[in-house]
Amino acid sequence: MHKEKYTEGQIRFNEFLDAHALDAQGNEYGIMPPLMTDEEALEILRLHFAPDYVSVNPIKDNQFNTELVFHILQTYKGKV
């Protein structure tokens, strides 16, 4: 039997979907995806594309986001 290996990003995304299956009124989203914050989205993408990436620069959170996006784009240039 073939066992699939999921990235931490895929696992976190599935956990997000399980935790946010219902809206604030307790209704299912149906065919529409649940709401996700920018921070949640970036963290899931970081875990999927650059799980071991750390910055060696003394920068703030938003600067790290810019550096992370640059790293992912350079690493996956022409691949996604």
Image (tube, rainbow, N blue to C red):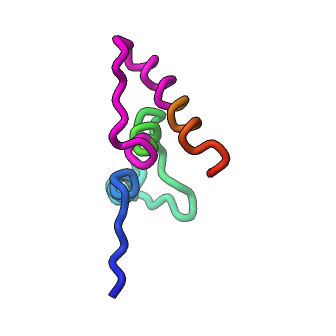
The image shows residue 4 at horizontal and vertical percentages of: 37, 73
Q: Residue at x 47, y 30 (%)?
A: 68
Asked if the magenta segment contains residue 36, the reply would be no
- 4 relative to 73, above or below: below
- 4 relative to 2, above or below: above
Q: Residue at x 52, y 38 (%)?
A: 72
Report the residue that reaches farthest toward the right: 78
Given residues 18 and 43, the one toward you in this image is 43
Answer with left or right where residue 69 lies relative to residue 57.
Answer: right
Q: Residue at x 40, y 57 (%)?
A: 10
Given residues 15 and 73, the one toward you in this image is 73
Asked if the magenta segment contains residue 48, the reply would be yes
Give the quadrant of the N terminus: bottom left
The image shows residue 43 at horizontal and vertical percentages of: 39, 39
Given residues 78 and 59, the one toward you in this image is 78
Give the number of callouts.
0
Q: Which residues are magenta?
A: 46-68
The image shows residue 36 at horizontal and vertical percentages of: 46, 42
- Answer with the quarter of the image where residue 14 lies: bottom left
- Answer with the quarter of the image where residue 39 lies: top left
Q: Residue at x 52, y 64 (%)?
A: 30
